Amino acid sequence: MAAGDDPGVTMLSDLASAGDAIARTSSKSEKVRILAQFLAVTDETELAQAARYFGGGVFPAGDHRTLQVGGAAFSAVLRAVSGADDATIRAAWRRHSDTGDVTGELLARADGRETAPISIRDLGREFAEIASARVAKERNAQLSALLGRVTPDEARYIAKLITGELRIGLREGLVEEAIAIAFGAPSDAVSRAVMLTGDLGEAALLARAGRLDDAAPHWFVPLRSMLATPVADAGEAVARLGKDVWVEDKYDGIRCQLHRRGSDTALYSRDLKNISAQFPEITAAAVHLHADVMLDGEILAFHDGRVMPFHALQTRLGRVSPDAEVMAAVPVIYVAWDVLRVDDEVLIDHPLRERRARLEALLVPHPLALAHLERVHGEAEIDRRFEDARARLNEGLLLKQPESPYTPGRRGLNWLKLKRPLDTLDVVVVGAEWGHGKRRGVLSDVTFAVRVDDTDDLATIGKAYTGLTDVEIAEMTALLLEITIADHGHYRTVEPRIVLEIAFDAVQFSARHKSGFALRFPRIARWRHDKAPTDIDTLSRVRDLANAIEHERVQLVDQTGA
Ligand code: AMP
């Protein structure tokens, strides 16, 4: 039976019509209503796919397949299938600036194509085949055959899904609301299911079956990380958390969720990428844990019992897998502060107090370690802990509410971060760039330098574009134009006359700038009209700051060493 004859099948053209209707209205509630209506009548076998597609995804969460069709490959296939010449393609791009709309237009102009309707289920099969193609040629041939036989409207949505951008004004939250309305479920239960499973498709199926309470995290599908809210001081922390507060160092490494099940282990970064191959010593150690677990923590460079600065860890990043030399030069540890699941028990709703006890009971083997935890009472004790952390040149502290649940993806008020007051440097502006967006037409991005000790030489150390008011930016633009030495188009070299005070989080060694240093998160604290370029900070002060961070910073970790 042809797909279109089966009443239980939902066609891609239906999805496209619903998508277009959603795009046409700017009312969020109307968008949700249209999508809910569509999902409510979508066949069960296609519901998960449809929900995922409206979320802009193609495969389920944790499914590691990707289509691997880049922009250039897609354009080449489209050109061949549509037979359009360069001028036509350029004109279509000028009109739409959107791959989906360009695809729709070029195929609508193509003569003599025979089309046949395609169901959502069939499209799923086509995507699976494209993803499993071993070489680009095979992949392109499959895509070409697919685009060759679908209608322009269907092709428009296929292009949107391939590029991952639906552009119909639908955020994930609205898809969740639509699922809730379609199946008469509470929308917070749908959101929770999406948060736990990471998959709109699975949440839609659970909502349809009235089983949202069964939603649970899957092994090797990372949950989003719980985040911390900044506070100004201990007083504010106590006001939010109460007097009994748990305090941990704010480690400066990379956030990492560890999943271990039997002999399989995977590490996920904060943006949910699988980074296992970069840290083989951690995955190897995790196999020796006495239970299957999902842990939350941080990867740190660690040598001779001390945490090394972030820039040391950087040599381990961005490599597919490290060689023995790099592993020996920059050893790493995994510092865990939370456990989200042990065997079949999901712990995220249990209080931190209990999760920590479960974590300690795991007796993590080196190079796994536990975050050093102190249980403090009241403002004065937090202050003391904070002074200690500052003396150890730490970035700051994490303050946690011992009775709180783990809330994935939320910057809630149960985790607070208290940071060391920032250092600042006085620098001089040596270059400027035109800004973008609402900063178009002003020289808002400045490059700045410090003085090379006892000379007139300047060494660049960074760039900043935030911190000034619009009035100051306008004033500075006028001055920068006046003191321009060379105009390179988007960048201007300027006379070193404007002194700025720059705030930053840390100083790092870096080859990016002439000074040999770079600042983390630099922002303009003040325009120092009161200072002359001769008063600015020197390279040796920068070196002292960097060395202090390099040599004296101590972060505490507890190693249980099973
Ligand atoms: P932020 O990224 O500024 O929201 O700060 C939160 C980040 O601090 C997390 O993403 C972690 O990578 C990091 N962090 C460092 N130490 C801890 C800790 N003890 N508990 C939780 N997060 C921590």
Image (cartoon, rainbow, N blue to C red):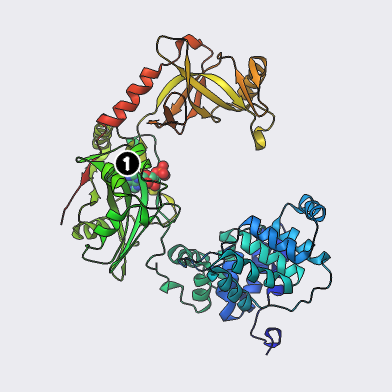
Q: Determine whether 472 is above or below 131 in the image.
A: above
Q: Nearer the viewer, residue 420 or 289?
A: 289
Q: How many marks?
A: 1
Viewer-proximal residue among 526 and 400: 526
Residue 369 spot, x, y in % from top left: 23, 51
Name the residue furthest left.
562
The answer to whether residue 509 is left or right of residue 121 is left
Q: Quadrant of the N terminus?
A: bottom right
Residue 27 visible in the shown view: no
Q: Position of residue 104 (x, y in %)?
A: 76, 63
Is residue 97 shown above or below 22?
Answer: above
Q: Amino acid at mark 1?
A: Lys
Answer yes or no: is residue 506 visible: yes
| Residue 208 in the image, given as x and y percentages of width and height | 53, 77
222 relative to 447, above or below:
below
Is ligand 1 closer than 8 angstroms to the Cβ of mark 1? yes
Within the image, what quadrant is residue 326 found in? top left
Q: Is residue 454 left or right of residue 557?
A: right
Under circle 1, the secondary element is loop
The image quadrant that residue 257 belongs to is bottom left
Depicted 178 relative to depicted 324: above or below: below
x 23%, y 51%: residue:
367
Q: Quadrant of the C terminus?
A: bottom left
Dot 1 alpha-carbon crowd within 10 angstroms: few under 14, some 14 to 19, many 20 or more: many
Task: Give residue 146's quadrant in the image.
Answer: bottom right
Which quadrant of the render holds ligand 1? top left
Q: Which residue is mark 1?
A: 250
The residue positioned 67% from the left and 87% from the top of the image is: 6
What residue do we see at 63% from left, 14% from top?
A: 483
Please state the horizontal and vertical placement of residue 518, each as a whole percent of the image. 43, 30
Looking at the image, which residue is at 65% across and 69% down? 141
